[in-house]
Image: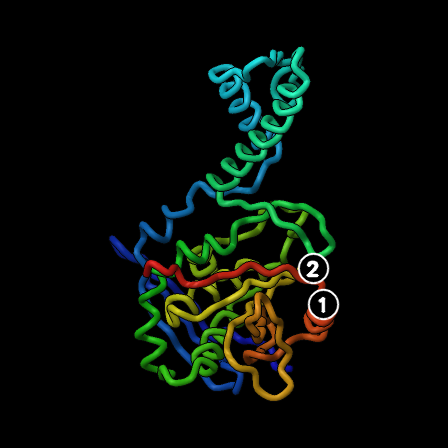
Amino acid sequence: MTSAKQLDFNKTTTDGHVQFNYQWLDQAQQPQALSFAIDKVALFDRFRNFKSYKANHASKYVDQQMRKQLTQHPITDVKVTFLGRGNNLQMELNSENKTALDQAYLSIAQLEQDFMNEHLTRNYYTQFVTYDNSLAIKPDHVRFAQESFTDLSVLKGLILDRVGEESVRKVSNYVLGFIQSIPYATLESRVTSTGAGFNPPLQILWQNQGDCDSKVTLTAAIFRALMPRIKMQLVFIDNHALLAINIPSEGDELTITIDGLDYILAEPTGPAMMRIGELSASAEFAIRNGRYYAEAFFADPST
């Protein structure tokens, strides 16, 4: 299988924008070129505070919020005593009313989960359940794509004028070739790395490299900018990621079905040059054996 080849990459910075210039060979080994400018504010400010997830920071935030909430809003008929500080914070509950005590334990567990979700959302992370039912935390890839695609709308006219709007496959393959040619950075373990190595979409362009999770997120954002109504799934397998789109399959292309909709799969990562519907042997094995986790990326119904 042909390997992706980026022939040239350069960028120039002006007062308000960064100009990106790319040249690469597509799946047919034909030269392609793409030049566009991205606003510097979008490029450098949008996700400037995103950083690797730290469990101790999350624990500290939850503990602080729990102490504040239960101090300002005591639980009726239940005495809450705080023991320890920081990561060692514990609570002792006492009540002569067993029903109130049982309900207090449930309420506190829900509060802890709510504050954890609040912390994750504030920091662009989300909890997910792997295909083998392990609970883990990862960057909120769908949200990154959702909040980035308008910054990439400059590509719509450039790509559709070149490829045409009639064929989703032609548009998809052009974008896949572009992304596959961007140098690959090895993915850290999604379950244990807690976001280390992930680049938000525009940062892949700036750094001219990205791991598979980063590249899939960028591809999803570009697809949304080019094809606003298309339904997508971001598909995660062990140490790899795919993109699935809801278009009719051709021939013996492997599909996945989620909530009654069929999706064909694409591998944006590279370095292998693959058209939509083509998968590596390892990715096909994982999909056929159900060893994947998918997140829906649909158009906002309000747009």
- Crowding at dot 1, Cα within 10 Å, few <14 / some 14-19 / many 20+, comes out as some
The residue to which callout 2 is attached is 238
Query: Which quadrant, please, contains the C terminus?
Result: bottom left
Q: Secondary structure at mark 1?
A: helix
User: At 62% across and 19% down in the image, what residue appears?
Assistant: 100
User: Could you tell me residue 248's position as x and y percent?
Assistant: 52, 81
User: At 54% across and 15% down in the image, what residue appears?
Assistant: 76
With respect to residue 300, does 270 lie above or below? below
Query: Which quadrant, please, contains the N terminus?
Result: bottom right
User: Could you tell me residue 127's position as x and y percent?
Assistant: 59, 45
From this viewpoint, is residue 89 visible?
Answer: no
Q: Nearer the viewer, residue 100 or 253?
A: 100
Q: In the image, what residue type sits under mark 1?
A: Ala
Q: Nearer the viewer, residue 296 or 2?
A: 296
From this viewpoint, is residue 212 visible?
Answer: yes
User: Could you tell me residue 264's position as x and y percent?
Assistant: 57, 76
With respect to residue 123, does 106 lie above or below? above
Residues at marks 1 and 2 touching, judged by CB atoms closer than 8 Å: yes
User: At 30% across and 56% down in the image, what residue appears?
Assistant: 39
Q: Quadrant of residue 290?
A: bottom right
Q: Nearer the viewer, residue 175 or 244?
A: 244
The residue to which callout 1 is attached is 286
Q: CA distance from mark 1 to mark 2?
A: 8 Å
Q: In the image, what residue type sits under mark 2?
A: Asp
Q: Quadrant of residue 210?
A: bottom right
Q: Earlier in the sequence, mark 1 or mark 2?
A: 2
